[in-house]
Amino acid sequence: TTENTDEAKLQEQRLKSASGSISYTLCLVHHTTNLNTKPKPKPKRKRKRKRKMQHLQYSPMTMTMDQLREYVTAPSTNQQLSPNTILLHIKHSNLTTMAFPEFRVHLDDTIAQIKQRVYKSTGTLTDYMELSLFAADGTTLIATIPANASAQLLSLTLRTLRLENNGIIYVKDTDPFSKSRHGGLEDITQVKKFEISDEAYQKRGDNYRKFKEEQMKKDPSWTLQKHMQKQRQGNGVHANDGCEKENMGTENDNKELDISVDSRCEVFPGSRRGCVKYVGQVSELGQGVWIGVAYDEPVGKHDGQVN
């Protein structure tokens, strides 16, 4: 304004006569002008609220003992499937006692592709493979694919045939020279056993008899189950590193199960294959002998640790 300018000039003349310098005047004039003007308010910044991370219901870090028990005892049909994926079960004419793993297929897979996958699971050649496709009830026949099927029939998809989830593929092996005929792959009595005389066995320096005699001299109460239990504890394969001996299961329980660590196994239902990593009791899961299995495929929901 005009008043502020005149007042500033008056103060400038006074300071010139007093100090003879103009540098202080410029500062004073600038400062006087700022005092008469209101500072501009700073714009308010909007604070962003941090969203809390939502954990999955069955995350391994938040999984309770009840949820773990429910998953271990639940059938494999609880596992989620995509809308275009179905689960089938294989039955073989020659392999009557063998249980095949889960057979997951896409609805757009052709019969030729299915026969190639069945060959990898059963060993039956595609040229000698006759397929019968049944519904989930096991009695309703949907289609029959002969061994010498035409190219048009082999190009059909499962979606075209309207095959249902949990359907059954019955494989008939027509190969007259198939190794699976007459129980060739199942009847162990047909397999020639390795035989050795007692004298030749005793001459071997690494036989089990000598090992057992040496252990019995050290500990008269020594058993193979106790020896395996000590090895499991030393390798750290049990469920809890701080568990006590009674939590590992009794000797009679392990003897009845006849299951050892690092042995191959197949879990039912679902025919999930894997390797045994723990045999014994787990107090957090309840009474009984629990078996920890590391699956070959990523179908589990935890890393094998209880605590």
Image (tube, helix red, strand yellow):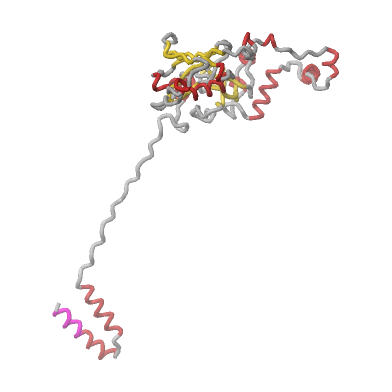
Q: Is residue 79 visible?
A: yes
Compared with 268, 25 (above or below) is below
In the rendering, at what x and y percent does residue 277 appear? 60, 25
Quadrant assignment, res 263: top right
In the rendering, at what x and y percent does residue 194 appear? 76, 14
Q: Nearer the viewer, residue 278 or 191?
A: 191
Q: Can residue 290 be seen in this view?
A: no
Specify whether 174 is left or right of 205: left
**Which secondary structure dominates the residues rendered in magenta?**
helix
Residue sitting at 60 percent across and 18 percent down? 249
Specify whether 44 is left or right of 124: left
Residue sitting at 76 percent across and 16 percent down? 220
Residue sitting at 42 percent across and 19 percent down? 165
Q: Which of 108 and 36 is in front in this view?
A: 108
Quadrant assignment, res 200: top right
Residue sitting at 20 percent across and 68 percent down? 38
In the rendering, at what x and y percent does residue 47 appear? 30, 51
- As drawn, the residue found furthest toward the left would be 2
Q: Which of 167 and 24 is in front in this view?
A: 167
Q: Which of 120 and 166 is in front in this view?
A: 120
Specify whether 25 is left or right of 278: left
Specify whether 200 is left or right of 239: right
Instruction: Give the residues drawn in magenta, as a range.
Output: 2-10
Q: Dividing the image into 4 quarters, which one contains the N terminus?
A: bottom left
